[in-house]
Image (cartoon, rainbow, N blue to C red):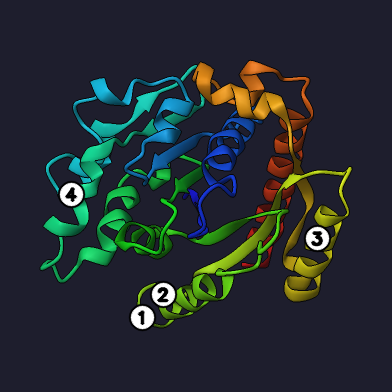
Amino acid sequence: MAHILCIANQKGGVGKTTTAVNLSAALAVSEKEVLLVDCDPQGNATSGVGLDKNRITKTLYHGLLGSAAAHELILTSDIDTLRIIPSNVELIGFEVEMMSNPDREAALKNLVTAVATDFDYIILDCPPSLSLLTVNALTAADALLIPLQCEFYALEGLGQLLQTVKRIKQHLNPHLVIAGILLTMFDRRTNLSYQVAEDAEKYFKNLVYKTTIPRNIRLSEAPSFGQPILLYDATSTGARSYFDLAREIMAAHVTDSARL
């Protein structure tokens, strides 16, 4: 059964999609079967693995509304063991069309459960909001990874996300845990990055990943070429960082599984 990891933070520009795409690729290159699910109407994870989101006829939208099964939506990528359920702007309609559906928070869970035995990891990339799509991802997930950018006001708004997680645990997904806090856009040349890291460790303690994701021009360039950083420039510091993160997550998953 797949380990389902949701990547969420309602703040935009913190590295959610960059992390979703590149962590998925790093896990796949590490000989894991990975499914990346693009839960954002912007469809950046879809284009980030080289797919033209405007030419795809069946997307996550159709799966959530029940007009297509999960296996009908899964597309391949340039990495054999990485597959994706794509999205595009159609997904905006999901919240309106599901408004009166009493099971609306569980639509994604119901969809991915059908293919969970086919993968080792399912990565859910969320939109930058605490919308019904994000609630669906948190309801479907085993664990939450929170990207935290090393900039001013980084911790601002996290309280709201943690309150949402608390409500999800109480009413929809009692088994949801926080997998970790990932420091992104870390600039070793500035005191600010170290200050944010110190604040995060003070607040979240051992939940902060040892791996940090640096500010890296190659990471910024890769999406415009429709490639994960591991394919665009495997020797870059950004690529090495996501390999390190993948190893950290796999090690934690093995440890957690051993406790069960």
Total numbered badges shown on the rendered structure:
4
Where residue 191 sits, quadrant-wise, is bottom right
Give the numbered dot on residue 171. 1
2 lies above or below 181: above
Q: Secondary structure at mark 1?
A: helix
Q: Secondary structure at mark 2?
A: helix
Circle 4 sits on which residue? 93
Q: Mark 1 or mark 3, which is nearer the start of the sequence?
A: 1
Circle 3 sits on which residue? 197
- Where in the figure is residue 1, as x and y percent of width and height? 47, 50
Where residue 83 sits, quadrant-wise, is top left
Which of discs 3 and 1 lies nearer the camera? The answer is 3
Q: Quadrant of the C terminus?
A: bottom right
Q: Is residue 79 visible?
A: no
- Where in the figure is residue 36, as x and y percent of width and height? 45, 38
Query: Who's the residue at 74% across and 37% down the image?
Result: 215
Q: Mark 2 or mark 4, which is nearer the start of the sequence?
A: 4
Which of discs 4 and 2 lies nearer the camera? The answer is 4
Q: Mark 1 or mark 4, which is nearer the start of the sequence?
A: 4
Q: CA distance from mark 4 to mark 2?
A: 23 Å
Query: Who's the residue at 59% across and 57% down the image?
Result: 145
186 lies above or below 154: above
Q: CA distance from mark 4 to mark 1?
A: 25 Å
